[in-house]
Image (tube, rainbow, N blue to C red):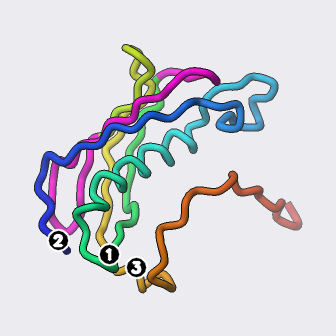
Amino acid sequence: MADLPPGITQSSRYPVTAGMSPPHLAPAQVLGTSTLVELMERTALESIAPHLAPGETSVGARIDVRHLRPAFPGEVLVVDSRLVEVGRRLCFEVTVSVGDRVVGTAWHERVVVERSRFGGEGPIRSPGPALQATPASGR
């Protein structure tokens, strides 16, 4: 693992879209917690990616999230991550806001791993469309 100093920061902007709304709230449209978590993780990963050795990436190991306020389509989220502890796990403080309104906060831990453990040396897959759950039989 490359030397990662505490204090690495990343600030990313993401527009809120109708597709980020959980289907069970339809017709209401509001940022879903699962998307909030994804953006928090992505921003933390992007902050350290340039500091990793070739063939390394990181995987999420823990995230403690507080989804505090709603965000609506058309608003722009600002996701700020800061690496605060470096050891076996990399620990981040993450804040998501829309203007002065804090939407969510998190304590997020990541672990650096060899990318080959996951079946290849290719680039990190960019997030695709949300997964569709298949109903379990007999329930």
Q: Is residue 63 left or right of residue 36?
A: left
| Mark 1 neighbour density, 10 Å: few (under 14) some (14–19) many (20 or more) | some
Q: Which residue lies under the disc numbered 3?
A: 115
Q: Is residue 46 above or below residue 37?
A: below
Q: Is residue 94 above or below residue 128?
A: above
Residue 51 versus residue 67: which sits nearer the camera?
51
| Mark 2 neighbour density, 10 Å: few (under 14) some (14–19) many (20 or more) | few
Q: Is residue 72 magenta?
A: yes
Callout 2, which amino acid?
Ala
Disc 2 vs disc 3: Cβ atoms closer than 8 Å? no
Q: Which residue lies under the disc numbered 1?
A: 56
Q: Could you tell me which secondary element the residue under label 2 belongs to? A: loop
Q: Position of residue 25 (x, y in %)?
A: 75, 29
Q: Position of residue 3 (x, y in %)?
A: 12, 67
Q: Is residue 16 left or right of residue 49?
A: right
Q: Quadrant of the N terminus?
A: bottom left
Callout 3, which amino acid?
Arg
Q: Residue at x 15, y 53 (%)?
A: 85
Callout 1, which amino acid?
Glu
Residue bounds of the magenta highlight? 69-93
Q: Residue at x 87, y 67 (%)?
A: 137
Mark 2 to mark 3 CA distance (whole Å):
14 Å
Looking at marks 2 and 3 on the same chain, the residue that comes earlier in the sequence is marked by 2
Q: Which residue lies under the disc numbered 2?
A: 2
Q: Could you tell me which secondary element the residue under label 3 belongs to? A: helix
Q: Residue at x 55, y 59 (%)?
A: 126
Among the 4 quarters of the image, the one containing residue 23: top right
Looking at marks 1 and 3 on the same chain, the residue that comes earlier in the sequence is marked by 1
Q: Is residue 101 magenta?
A: no
Looking at marks 1 and 2 on the same chain, the residue that comes earlier in the sequence is marked by 2
Mark 1 to mark 2 CA distance (whole Å):
9 Å
